[in-house]
Image: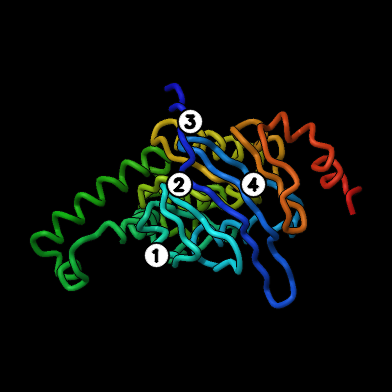
Amino acid sequence: MSRQAIGEVILDVKNISLSFGGVKALTDISFDVREHEIRAIIGPNGAGKSSMLNCINGVYTPQHGNITFRGKTFDHMNSREVAEMGIARTFQNLALFKGMNVIDNIMSGRNLKMKTNIFQQALRIGAAEREEQEHREVVERIIDFLEIQAWRKTPVARLPYGLQKRVDLGRALAMEPQVLLLDEPMAGMNVEEKQDMCRFVLDVNDQFGTTIVLIEHDMGVVMDISDRVVVLDYGKKIGDGTPDEVRRNEEVISAYLGTSH
């Protein structure tokens, strides 16, 4: 399937600054994300990448700047509002329910979509039963897409790390996001697991048309799958452009080689 055409700006980050006490995590960061693109955020450890994602998905409230999503501008918003608007997130440190099986973990991503109340859901009566059936069908399609059918009923704690990362991706996809924030989806993986995850990221972008914002340390992965790359170093933006442009940027090269400070 050919990739969907990259569209207009869907997410616009303007002059974001974030401090914790006297420590500046982000200083005057601006960049945009276009519909259907894969947008990478890279930089050395401590560059502010995860802090940037936390500002976008409402975990942190920046002291300065704002974020515009689909033409609506926010100084701050909470994580639930962000999720309801269509921005989903995976986490660097897996936040899965380890005692629950694969299906139930991915089902937890459907909570925002459920209209019936907890009492109806508990009794599984009428509308609640029909609704649960519809959500389970969506979840089963995600399980097929991620090729984890064989582990549907397996407690997540018993899965190898690479498969747990897939379940984490599945739970985010269950929210049917317009924008998917991936925080180091390939961290800690072996070569084969990374290749699989790369394929799934590209397929999510191709088949669902999902816009992806990706933090990743593996430069080979970033240069292979990204449309555009923004580079942070010590909480400041030092590069922004296509992978080729970023690859040739002297400030980026020196930051990665350790000669800029």
Say which label, 2 or 1, has the lower sequence index.
1
In 3D space, how far apart are the residues under numbered discs 3 and 4 (Cα atoms)? Answer: 18 Å
In 3D space, how far apart are the residues under numbered discs 2 and 4 (Cα atoms)? Answer: 14 Å
Say which label, 3 or 1, has the lower sequence index.
3
User: For the residue marked with disc 2, what is the amino acid?
Assistant: Val
Viewer can see residue 194:
yes
> Circle 4 is placed at which residue position?
41
In 3D space, how far apart are the residues under numbered discs 4 and 1 (Cα atoms)? Answer: 23 Å
The answer to which of 168 and 65 lies nearer the viewer is: 65
Q: Secondary structure at mark 2?
A: strand
Please tell me the numbered disc located at residue 179. Answer: 2
Residue at position x 20%, y 49% from top? 134
Please tell me the numbered disc located at residue 80. Answer: 1
In 3D space, how far apart are the residues under numbered discs 3 and 2 (Cα atoms)? Answer: 13 Å
Quarter of the rendering containing residue 64: bottom right
Identify whether 214 is placed above or below 8: below
> Circle 3 is placed at which residue position?
6
Q: Secondary structure at mark 1?
A: helix
User: For the residue marked with disc 1, what is the amino acid?
Assistant: Arg
The answer to which of 213 and 100 lies nearer the viewer is: 213
Q: Do the CB atoms of the residues marked 4 and 1 lie less than 8 Å apart?
A: no
Mark 3, other Cα within 10 Å: few <14 / some 14–19 / many ≥20: some
Location of the C terminus (image quadrant)? bottom right
Task: Looking at this view, name the residue that lies furthest to the left.
Answer: 126
Q: Secondary structure at mark 3?
A: loop
Q: Do the CB atoms of the residues marked 2 and 4 lie less than 8 Å apart?
A: no
Residue 167 locus on image (x, y percent)? 45, 51
Residue at position x 76%, y 53% from top? 233
User: For the residue marked with disc 3, what is the amino acid?
Assistant: Ile
